[in-house]
């Protein structure tokens, strides 16, 4: 898999809206974000996402309707792989152990994960 560039928190927020809506004009993204950011700010972020290869658009005159070209799952996988390497020596076992020690994952969660692994085979 091609290495995806890590997005800023604001870029991830905009991508989350685009993944949810599947396609949107900047004004729709602003609306979905409940006006937390100015139109021009969102417009700039969307253009940055386009430059990074995360979104594309369809033109309607001078307006652009944006849509994601990177799937949420592909981005999530890339980020988790990067974090695993960065913080846990590339070991998901170490990552899960960390969350268990921090009490962020329960025994029931672990049982559910084991069931998912067993059923995948």
Image (cartoon, helix red, strand yellow):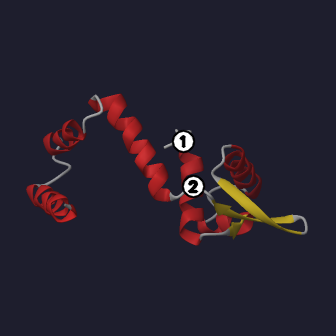
Instruction: Residue at 54%, 41% (x, y): give it.
Output: 4
* Mark 1 and mark 2 residues within 8 Å of each other at the beta carbon: yes
Q: Secondary structure at mark 1?
A: loop
Instruction: Residue at 59%, 48% (x, y): give it.
Output: 11
The location of residue 111, given as percent across then percent down, is: 10, 59
Residue behind mark 1: 4
Q: Give the total of numbered labels.
A: 2
Position of residue 78 in the picture relative to residue 112 (left or right): right
Residue 114 visible at all: yes
Q: Closest to the observer: 9 or 3?
A: 3
| Figure check: 63 above or below 53 | below
The location of residue 104, given as percent across then percent down, is: 20, 49
Q: Secondary structure at mark 2?
A: loop
Q: Earlier in the sequence, mark 1 or mark 2?
A: 1
The location of residue 58, given as percent across then percent down, is: 78, 66
Q: Which mark is residue 70?
A: 2
Q: Residues within 10 Å of mark 1 (few under 14, many from 20)?
A: some
Quadrant of the image for the C terminus?
bottom left
Q: CA distance from mark 1 to mark 2?
A: 9 Å
Q: Closest to the observer: 33 or 82?
A: 82
Instruction: Residue at 32%, 30% (x, y): give it.
Output: 87
The location of residue 2, given as percent across then percent down, is: 53, 41
Instruction: Residue at 18%, 52% (x, y): give it.
Output: 105
Q: Closest to the observer: 12 or 67?
A: 67
Quarter of image, res 27: bottom right
Position of residue 22 in the picture relative to residue 82 (left or right): right
């Amino acid at each position: 898999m091609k290495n995806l560039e890590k997005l800023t928190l604001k870029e991830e927020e905009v991508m989350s809206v685009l993944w949810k809506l599947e396609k949107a004009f900047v004004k729709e993204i602003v609306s979905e974000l409940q006006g937390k950011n100015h139109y021009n700010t969102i417009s700039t972020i969307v253009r940055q996402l386009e430059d990074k290869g995360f979104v594309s658009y369809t033109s309607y005159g001078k307006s652009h309707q944006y849509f994601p070209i990177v799937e949420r799952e592909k981005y999530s996988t890339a980020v988790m792989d990067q974090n695993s390497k960065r913080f846990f020596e590339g070991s998901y076992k170490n990552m899960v152990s960390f969350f268990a020690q921090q009490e962020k994952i329960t025994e029931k969660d672990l049982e559910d994960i084991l069931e998912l692994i067993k059923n995948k085979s």
